[in-house]
Image (cartoon, rainbow, N blue to C red):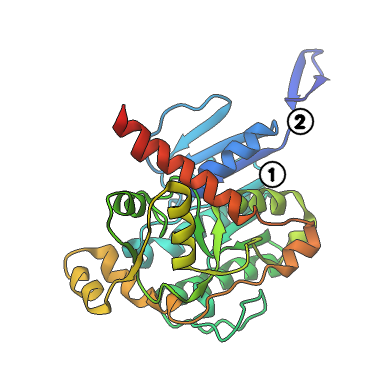
Amino acid sequence: MGVVLHWSKGHTLFMEQTTKLHVVLGAGQVGTLLRERLVARGERVRVVQRSASTPIAGVEQVRGDITNLDFAERATEGAAVVYDCMNPLYHQWKELLVPLATGSLHGATKAGAKLVALDCLYMYGKPKGPMTEDTEMVPCSKKGELRVALHHLRMNAHRSGSTRVAIARASDFIGPDLGASYWSPRFFERVLAGKTGECFGDPEMPHSYTYANDVADALATLGDNSLADGRVWHVPTNAPETTQAIGTRFGKTLGIDVRMARVPKLAVRAAGLFIPMMRELAEMTYQWEVPFVIDDTRFRQAFGASPTPMDVIIERTAEWARSRFITQRAA
């Protein structure tokens, strides 16, 4: 960490930190990966989260509710870049999504910081072709409507000149140890026990899956580049494959036969009567009923970035699954 030495009027020597402060809001799937990258390159990092956590070497940790604007202002004080990686559970979106985004925007504005926000693809609705950053926002779900509201909230702030904003959008995540993913611990537990993998739509439909580590890399890139300001950017993502094809890849690497099966819509709705997350999932099954393809040309051309090859993603994820569900059991 760099320092600059100063003499005050009273000739007292003091030090000023010169490394920019990066504030990561959220310590979930992507926030954690982003924090690791920023620390690895020697940045000052502050992580803000709602719940308590184990101390992390070299990281300032703050606990609190970012929907409280006073707290949001204190938590982001001194930041050069604020990364909004917060994503509550589906059934909490109506209550929390906009207030969380409002808090992150407020904190970044008060700090004079740039806001880099992680987003998804729900605002586009049911696609009629590959989705670009300029695809019309025609949501077909309640969650998509909320995402449209977040887009306008953030971009209006940028256009008004109050806050510099860059938005990263990714498709469904793939990678090791992702609880909120098709390729979750539940998936690997099932297939390693000889059961089918679950798909909430057609497993033979082409679908883009974005590597979570590439999402973290993209956020860091957007935070560093003024070229990113005021625009939406699709995270580099591999060419679409069917969910069954990716399941087959995992099976080949793990030495098992993986079969993906559609979960009937009636079963999803029935489960939703008792499980809030399943109730909210029902309206999102459209993503597996048509080709769901992300176009990342803008990001690739602007920053010279490419996604991690799918072969590498499969191997890294399978190695994690092997260590967690096979090696540990054998021990």
Tell me, yes or no, whether the two marked residues, 1 and 2, touch with CB atoms within 8 Å.
Answer: no
Q: Nearer the viewer, residue 216 or 258?
A: 258
Question: What is the number of the mark on residue 18?
Answer: 2
Location of the N terminus by quadrant is: top right
At mark 2, the secondary structure is: loop
Q: Is 165 rendered above or below residue 217?
A: below
Q: Residue at x 62, y 52 (%)?
A: 214
- Say which quarter of the image contains residue 307: bottom right
Mark 2 residue crowding within 10 angstroms, few (<14) / some (14–19) / many (20+): few
Location of the C terminus by quadrant is: top left
Q: Is residue 330 left or right of residue 311?
A: left
Q: Is residue 14 left or right of residue 96?
A: right
Mark 1 residue crowding within 10 angstroms, few (<14) / some (14–19) / many (20+): some
Q: Nearer the viewer, residue 331 or 152?
A: 331
Rounded to the nearest whole Å, what is the CA distance between mark 1 and mark 2? 11 Å
Q: Position of residue 217 (x, y in %)?
A: 65, 49
Label 1 is placed on what type of residue? Ala
Q: Residue at x 62, y 67 (%)?
A: 239
Q: Position of residue 205 (x, y in %)?
A: 47, 76
Q: Earlier in the sequence, mark 1 or mark 2?
A: 2
At mark 1, the secondary structure is: loop
Q: Position of residue 108 (x, y in %)?
A: 61, 51
Give the total number of marks visible in the rendering: 2
Which residue lies under the disc numbered 1? 80
Q: Residue at x 74, y 48 (%)?
A: 224
Q: Is 167 rendered above or below residue 123?
A: above
Label 2 is placed on what type of residue? Thr
